[in-house]
Amino acid sequence: MLEPNAMVLYVNNLNRSGEFYQDILGSEPVESSPTFSFFNFSNGMGLGLKVKTSVQPPATDEVGGTEIVFSLSSTDKVDELFKQWQKKDIAFAQLPTQLPFGYTFVALDPDDNRLRVISM
């Protein structure tokens, strides 16, 4: 089976997005250039940030519109992270709520990509 090991988000402002992700992830990028930053995670997945205007071949879609999911072990941990992110003035698309698939909230990064935090 073919399994993804990284995703790349196209961003408008690499400095702003890089600082945002460095803050919420609590780690620095393992690779960084004027147009690209890359974060590695202990689970083997990686997250790249690429300046949209430097993508080859050129990207046709607007930035934003992606959802990254962070699964936590309990609803208490979801609420705790929500409060931490509120203190950082992160924008939210959805406040903590129970949905059919789990207890969740959705935050937005500087390019309006969705960051879903969930306990299932």
Image: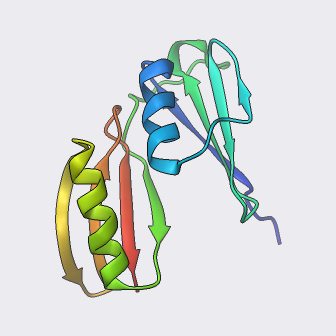
The residue that appears at 23% across and 82% down in the rendered structure is 99
In the rendered image, the vertical position of residue 22 relative to residue 74, given as above or below: above
Task: Specify whether 96 is left or right of 8.
Answer: left
Residue that extends furthest to the right in the rendered view of this protein: 1
In the rendered image, residue 80, in percent from the top left (x then y), is placed at 30, 70
The residue that appears at 35% across and 40% down in the rendered structure is 109
Observer-nearest of 65 and 15: 15
Observer-nearest of 2 and 115: 115
In the rendered image, residue 49, in percent from the top left (x then y), is placed at 57, 32
What colour scheme governs how the chains and residues are painted in the rendered image of this protein?
rainbow
In the rendered image, residue 54, in percent from the top left (x then y), is placed at 60, 13
Task: Specify whether 84 is left or right of 71.
Answer: left
Q: Quadrant of the N terminus?
A: bottom right
The residue that appears at 74% across and 56% down in the rendered structure is 5
Total labels drawn: 0
Observer-nearest of 67 and 95: 95
Q: Quadrant of the C terminus?
A: bottom left
Task: Specify whether 105 is left or right of 61.
Answer: left
In the rendered image, the vertical position of residue 78 relative to residue 7, given as above or below: below
In the rendered image, the vertical position of residue 71 relative to residue 42, given as above or below: below
In the rendered image, residue 55, in percent from the top left (x then y), is placed at 62, 19
In the rendered image, the vertical position of residue 119 relative to residue 44, given as above or below: below
